[in-house]
Each structure stands twice: as structure tokens, then as C-alpha cells.
Image (tube, grey):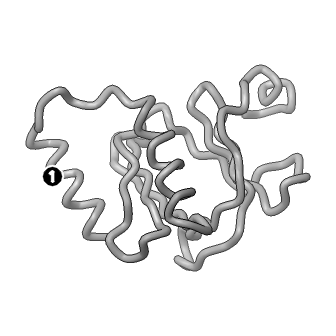
Amino acid sequence: FTSNLEFMAHKKMKMGWLEKQSKHFRIFRKRWIESYSGDKLCSYSKASSESPTEIIDLSGIHKAYKSNINTNEFIIAYFEDGSIKSRRFRASTIEKANKWISYFNQSIDNCEHSCSRCNKLDEQIMSK
């Protein structure tokens, strides 16, 4: 989003506190997460903040995965600029992590069959 007017044009679909792994330092930071219709995921350092610390374009989302490292962690894999990207999040409970995973996966047009491209992507994401 480039302005507050653009935020107002999209409906908040899901929101809550999660820990998000930073891209560069790989440390987890507590963030207020808001998911908007129109495939945007915004993170904020405070729930009352008006400017997001990051906006993730989820129009190319592939899948949300349960982490094999921590039961409260999940990974979102998405396509951006022709390559696959992923972001790792932690919820305070397993139940909350599962709700976020279900939320992301319910809006995805999954392959009706197990295609080799998807299987390869799944292996790459889970090995990170």
C-alpha cells in the first residue's frame, strides 16, 4: 500500500500478535500482523502503529507449512519476482499457529494433483 487510503480500501481478514523472523538477522521479533483482502500481509511493531514495518505481497502464495523445528512455528512460501520466498512466524500456542496455517491455506488454489514442481518446492522450503 502506498497510502492510508489504500489500507482503507482493503478489509482486514485476520490479525494478531506473532513473532516474525527477520530477513537478514534471522532473529524473531514480536509483531502485530494484519492480513488484508487483496493479498497483503502487514507487520507492525505495535498494534497502534500506522506504518507497517513490512508489507508482504501474498498474491503469489504457494502454501503455509507447519515448521519441523518448533511446534508453534509456521512458514509461508510465496512467489515474488519470479522466485520462491519464505517467511517464518511463531505463534504463542500450537492452536494459534494452526489457525494461521488454515487461514492462509484456505484461500489457495492448490494443485488437484501432486505435481513434481510443488513437491520440489515443499522440499526446498522445509529444508530451510
- Spot the residue most to the front: 95
Instruction: Specify the amino acid type for callout 1.
Output: Lys
Q: Nearer the viewer, residue 72 or 32?
A: 72
Residue 77 appears left or right of 119:
right
Give the residue displayed 72% in from the left and 34% down from the top: 1
Residue 26 appears left or right of 37:
left
Give the residue displayed 79% in from the left and 62% down from the top: 45
Q: Secondary structure at mark 1?
A: helix
Residue 105 found in image quarter: top left
Give the residue displayed 28% in from the left and 31% down from the top: 110
Judge whether 85 appears above or below 115 on screen: below
Query: Where is residue 46 shown, x and y percent of the image?
Result: 84, 60
Residue 116 found in image quarter: top left
- Spot the residue most to the top: 9
Q: Nearer the viewer, residue 89 or 55?
A: 89
Q: Nearer the viewer, residue 74 or 98?
A: 98
Q: Badge 1 is on which residue?
A: 120
